[in-house]
Image (cartoon, grey):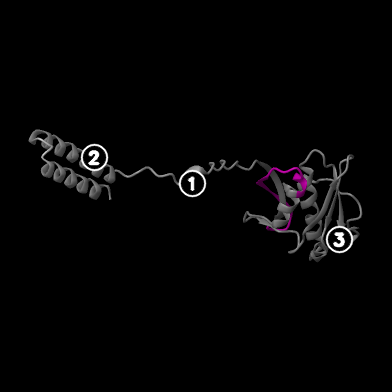
């Protein structure tokens, strides 16, 4: 557009000079050179890309992701031969209710080949409460009653008790099932609190 305008302006000025005789040859030459330079400048400006502002340049930069703080916990699962417990160390997210998170991680099951799940499939944590005297009350769903043998039931209980016993604030564990204090499963008395027994993990 600018190029066409300059060309037209050049033609008009030259025509006026020639018709009016008011421009000397030297002046005409100078005028023509000036117009040529103006035309070159205009063309060069058209070639140079104009800086543009992108919408993303106007937006604030997103804050860098803060890595999650984790803590190592020791979870206890059954041995393959059914004769005791095996410890499995795992990193979990550090939260205010770390005991709750730990039990939920335990119930997800083992990740190591030598570890065996002891809690029946579907068992979930309903509630957990740690009292000032060190008693931890754990309320599980009724799926826990599906333990198949007395040996599995005993190891299942100590899987939970030993896992929670890793925390200094937990001295013993009392089990509840669907909101009621546990009684007997497979001839195993669960009505009394249990203290950790780490001899099972040797």
Label 2 vs label 3: CA separation? 86 Å
Q: Is residue 120 magenta?
A: no
Q: Secondary structure at mark 1?
A: helix
In magenta, the rendered stretch is 80-100
| 18 sits left or right of 142 in the view | left
On the image, numbered disc 3 is attached to which residue?
178
Mark 2 or 1, which is nearer the eye? 2
Mark 2 or 3, which is nearer the eye? 2
- Classify 161 as above or below 167: below
Taking the spot 65% from the left edge, 41% from the top edge, the residue there is: 69
The circle drawn on residue 41 is 2
On the image, numbered disc 1 is attached to which residue?
56
Q: Is residue 3 visible?
A: yes
| 202 sits left or right of 46 in the view | right
Pointer 2 with pointer 1, Cβ within 8 A: no
How many residues crowd mark 1 within 10 Å: few (<14), some (14–19), many (20+)? few
Q: Position of residue 48 (x, y in %)?
A: 29, 43
Label 3 vs label 1: CA separation? 53 Å
Q: Secondary structure at mark 2?
A: helix
């Amino acid at each position: 557009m600018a190029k066409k305008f300059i060309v037209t302006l050049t033609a008009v000025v030259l025509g006026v000079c020639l018709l009016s005789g008011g421009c000397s040859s030297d002046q005409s030459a100078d005028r023509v050179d000036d117009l040529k330079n103006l035309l070159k400048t205009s063309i060069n400006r058209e070639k140079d890309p104009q800086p543009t502002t992108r919408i993303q340049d106007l937006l604030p930069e997103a804050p860098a992701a803060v890595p999650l703080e984790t803590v190592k916990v020791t979870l206890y699962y059954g041995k393959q031969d059914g004769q005791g417990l095996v410890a499995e160390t795992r990193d979990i997210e550090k939260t205010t209710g770390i005991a709750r998170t730990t039990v939920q991680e335990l119930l997800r099951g083992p990740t190591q080949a030598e570890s065996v799940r002891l809690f029946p499939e579907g068992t979930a944590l309903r509630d957990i409460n740690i009292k000032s005297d060190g008693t931890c009350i754990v309320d599980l769903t009724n799926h826990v009653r599906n333990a198949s043998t007395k040996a599995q039931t005993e190891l299942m209980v100590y899987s939970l008790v030993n896992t929670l016993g890793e925390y200094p604030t937990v001295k013993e564990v009392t089990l509840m099932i669907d909101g009621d204090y546990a009684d007997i499963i497979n001839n195993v008395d669960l009505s009394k609190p249990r203290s950790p027994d780490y001899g099972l993990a040797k």
